[in-house]
Image (tube, helix red, strand yellow):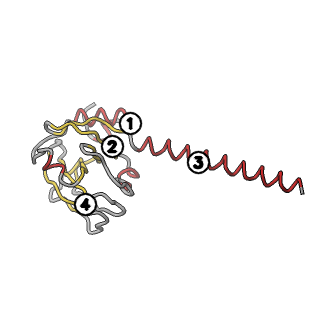
Amino acid sequence: MDLIIKTTLACLIIFFMQGCKRDDADKASEELEKEFFDLRLGMVELRVEASVLAEERERGLMFRNSMAAREGMLFVFEQGTKQRFWMKNTRIPLDIGYFSSTGALSEVHRAKPHDLSGVPSRSRDVKFVLELNAGAYKNLGIRIGDRISLSEVSRILKTRGLNPRDYDLPD
């Protein structure tokens, strides 16, 4: 009987320790995902997460419950193309700003949580997309034609260990 109790106790300790290791790894992963960068849009200072790799762009802001004011997610694409963003598993109402290859804001669309219909761009030259809280573009005074700095985007990519040239951006 003593052997059964000791074996059970040992199994519980091992199980608990494995669970703790997984939690630590998950926390570290979450912190990496939430690395913020300073980005100026026109005259407005923002803090953005960079969503550059395909798997990051696919996940976007899914499953988030909130986002702070003046924070957003910047999506960077290799080439300027037509874009369509949808809100699968996205709980936060958003403004989706589409930017040209030159960094100029060309259009802003409101997106509703969990809307699967998608928000298509009118432009065929969308290289950057910036998601902010719903109403933020208007509330912050950001206008069509305002620009993000391509050199700032390059800096973000370099910090992430990526080559800006792969995204047709200046070094």
Task: Say whether marks 3 and 4 touch (CB < 8 Å).
Answer: no
Alpha-carbon span between mark 1 and mark 3? 24 Å
Residue assigned mark 4: 84
Task: Say whether marks 2 and 3 touch (CB < 8 Å).
Answer: no
Disc number placed over residue 50 in the picture, else none? 2
Q: Residues within 10 Å of mark 4 (few under 14, many from 20)?
A: few
Quadrant containing the N terminus is bottom right
Task: Say whether marks 1 and 4 touch (CB < 8 Å).
Answer: no
Alpha-carbon span between mark 2 and mark 3? 25 Å
The local secondary structure at tag 4 comes to: strand
Pinpoint residue 65: horizontal percent, then vertical percent.
Answer: 36, 55
Pinpoint residue 58: horizontal percent, then vertical percent.
Answer: 37, 56
The local secondary structure at tag 3 comes to: helix
Q: How crowded is mark 3: few (under 14 residues within 10 Å), some or many (20 or more)?
A: few
> Which amino acid, by three-letter code, is at mark 2?
Ala
Comes first in the chain, label 2 or label 3: 3
- Is label 1 or label 3 in front? 3
Disc number placed over residue 121 in the picture, else none? none
Residue appearing at x 61%, y 45% in the figure: 21
Residue assigned mark 3: 22
> Which amino acid, by three-letter code, is at mark 4?
Arg
Task: Say whether marks 1 and 2 touch (CB < 8 Å).
Answer: yes
